[in-house]
Amino acid sequence: MLTSSDITNRKPVWKALSEFYLDNQLDDEEIEQVSRVIFESPYSIEEVKRINKYEIFPILQWNLLSIAGEWDYFDENWLVARITNRLDNQSWYSILLVDLSYPLFKWMTANNWSKVEKMYVQISNTTEI
């Protein structure tokens, strides 16, 4: 179960990663925005990939397979409610299903991840601490 602090920290990451599951191509500006959200979050890029796999992917993967998928945006309240509900009711079986299905579908967001990782490194290298 996530604490309210976890949810507060994850919300911008969830919203940013949801862009990967819209039925459209992300432009460079959107890639940079997603990368900045990840960089400014308290999570490493590897932790964000895990958040994507176990928290975003199970909720939004089907949008990429839908003929009439969402292409504009996912409502933040809907997204947060769906994710937190799923996490609150998560079982070993649901984790196993993700582990089995993610390798089959991750190619659908691989191009975005590649671009985000490159941009994340650029942001990391140009941001003074």
Image: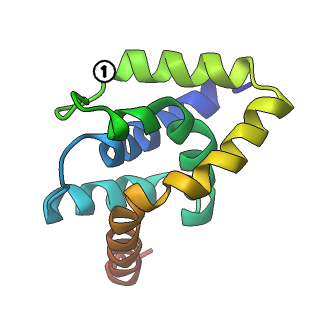
Residue at 36% x, 38% y: name it. 65
Disc 1 crowd rating (10 Å Cα; few below 14, some 14-19, many 20+) is few
Residue at 62% x, 16% y: name it. 85
Q: How far from the left and from the top, in percent, is residue 23?
A: 23, 41
Q: Circle 1 sits on which residue?
A: 75
Residue at 41% x, 39% y: name it. 12
Seen from this angle, which residue lies furthest bottom?
Answer: 125
- In depth, the one of 45 and 97 nearer the eye is 97
| Side of 86 where 12 appears, left or right | left
| Side of 93 where 66 appears, left or right | left
- In depth, the one of 73 and 29 nearer the eye is 73
Seen from this angle, which residue lies furthest front?
Answer: 67
Q: Based on the displayed image, in which of its 4 quarters is residue 126 positioned?
A: bottom left
Q: Which quadrant holds the C terminus?
A: bottom left
Height in image: 104 above or below 15?
Answer: below
SS under mark 1: loop
Q: How far from the left and from the top, in percent, is residue 115?
A: 32, 72
Height in image: 41 above or below 126?
Answer: above
| Side of 97 where 46 appears, left or right | left
Q: Which quadrant holds the N terminus?
A: top right
- In depth, the one of 118 and 21 nearer the eye is 21
- Is there any visible trace of residue 23 in the rendered image? yes
Count of numbered marks: 1
Height in image: 127 above or below 55?
Answer: below
Q: Based on the displayed image, in which of its 4 quarters is residue 3 positioned?
A: top right
Say which amino acid is labelled 1.
Answer: Asp
Residue at 56% x, 55% y: name it. 104
| Side of 45 where 72 appears, left or right | left
